Amino acid sequence: MENRSYWKKKILEVILTLLVVTLLSFLLMRLSPIDPATAYVTRNTPIVTAEQIQEARVKLGLDQPLLVQYGQWVFKACQLDFGISLASGRSVTTEIGKALPVSLAVVLLSGLIMGLGSIMVGSLHYFLWDHWLGLVLSLVAILGLSIPAFYLASRLQALKNGEVDMLYGNVLMTYDEYQQAIQMASIGGEISDHNSETRNLALNAGSVMLNDLKVREALAYAIDKEAISKGLTYGYEEVAETLFDEGIPYTDVKLNAVRRFDLEKANALLDEAGWVKNASTGIREKDGVSLKLTFTYDSGEIMNKSIATLLKSQLSEVGIEVETVGQDMYTWWKEGIAGNYDITIWCTEQPYNSPHNFFTPMLDSSCHVPAIAALADGQTFTNAIKAFSTTDDPAQVTEIFSYLLNYSNDNVLNIPLTYVKDMIVYNTDKIEDYTFTTTPMFFEVDGITPAV
């Protein structure tokens, strides 16, 4: 009888704990300064109307009383229905299912390392407790446990707290953070009308998995650039059909082919290349080898991880498995030149030194080096790059860049994604406005209008 009462008590405690945790989680989400309806609408269009926001509020059930919203949220969660991802447009449950095996592997591995490390440090401390090394070990252990995970305050929190008055650029700030910032009290923001560079994927034609042109073409057709534009940049970044934006000298070239999102064509090309989808895994195989690509990126660029994750999800739709690898800038650059990648993010240069400074590094200092070396006529391509550096004849330079851009496009050495924008957020108590210069990626102090 006592045993039964004990278990009843424990079950009741679990139910109450779950109730409190879910309620607090729900309320914390609602306390966010971001309006969910506004965020939902701006994911699909940069120009938002009050009518669109109200429609979204009804669609998402945000017009219901708070307790009703909570009940619906818990009911759906119990059915493992966590809604649709705003980033990918797919079921959150499906996205979790894809990532769960990798996450579990990381957790188990990190737990094993932490366990073995703790045993080693504890054993050393036992034998060195009266030695100065024992004191050092104790201090390290205490610091490790005492410093909270949130010690490094977010950039937005620093802006909100007045620790900084302005954040500028697209390298250290995502469009999500921009949206969050401009909805805070006393915070304003601007996004430039000018495109600063092109987010671009470089494909390694020299890798085992991508040495077939049909596979590289399939990747170009399998990528939904619109989803990147709307899902990750709120539509601010326009889809890039060409490697360089309009108006850049020598780049107004008619391409032999323009590849747009087309899953049917992507699947057909992979079939032609001999890659057959395994019905049980969903991954394509050829001669017993899975079609698995390594996607590297510079982890210092804040948008790169989100882009890599989204593209990994998109490519899985056509049976391509992708391993994303974030690296520090030097490692990413070094491994790129060495050819230790299949896909990497390699943006173009700024408009004022393009296209010259995008192609010149392909001779010896960009990730394109191993890709070009693997192509039968790669030497002709590199000779053309050398040629534009030794002539000042505009007609000849135009002819050379027409060849270079079409060669790169025909061989799918690059897949342009979107055109990047500069952005700024600032404390409106200190700054009234900011005017961008016509030179992208350059901060101009004179562009600041101080608050009166």
Image (cartoon, rainbow, N blue to C red):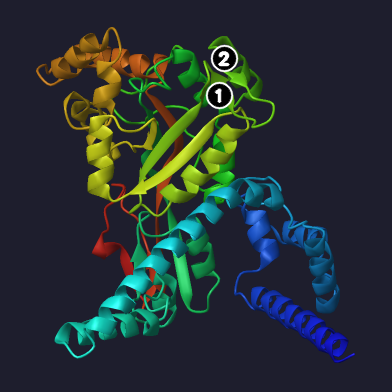
Which element carries disc 2, helix, strand or loop?
helix
Mark nearer the N terminus (1 vs 2): 1
* 247 to 308, vertically: above or below: above
Question: Is the residue marked by circle 1 packed among few (<14), some (14-19), or many (20+) residues within 10 Å?
Answer: many
Q: Is there CB contact under 8 Å for labels 1 and 2?
A: yes
Quarter the N terminus occupies: bottom right
> Where's residue 219, x and y in %?
51, 25
The answer to whether residue 334 is above or below residue 54 is above
Residue 78, horizontal then vertical, whole percent: 81, 63
Q: Secondary structure at mark 1?
A: helix
On screen, residue 441 above or below 226? below
For mark 1, what is the residue? 221
The answer to whether any part of residue 48 appears in the image is no
Residue 383 shows in this picture: yes
In terms of depth relative to the viewer, which is nearer, 284 or 134?
A: 134
Q: Residue at x 83, y 87 (%)?
A: 3
> Residue, x 79% and y 67% (percent of image)?
73
Instruction: Say which residue label 2 marks.
Output: 269
* In this rendering, position of residue 314 left or right of residue 167: right
Closer mark to the observer between disc 1 and disc 2: 2
**In the rendering, at what x and y percent does residue 195 appear?**
39, 43
The residues bearing labels 1 and 2 have C-alpha atoms spaced at a distance of 9 Å
Residue type at mark 1? Answer: Tyr
Q: Alpha-carbon neighbours of circle 2 within 10 Å: few (<14), some, or many (≥20)?
A: many
Residue type, numbered disc 2: Leu
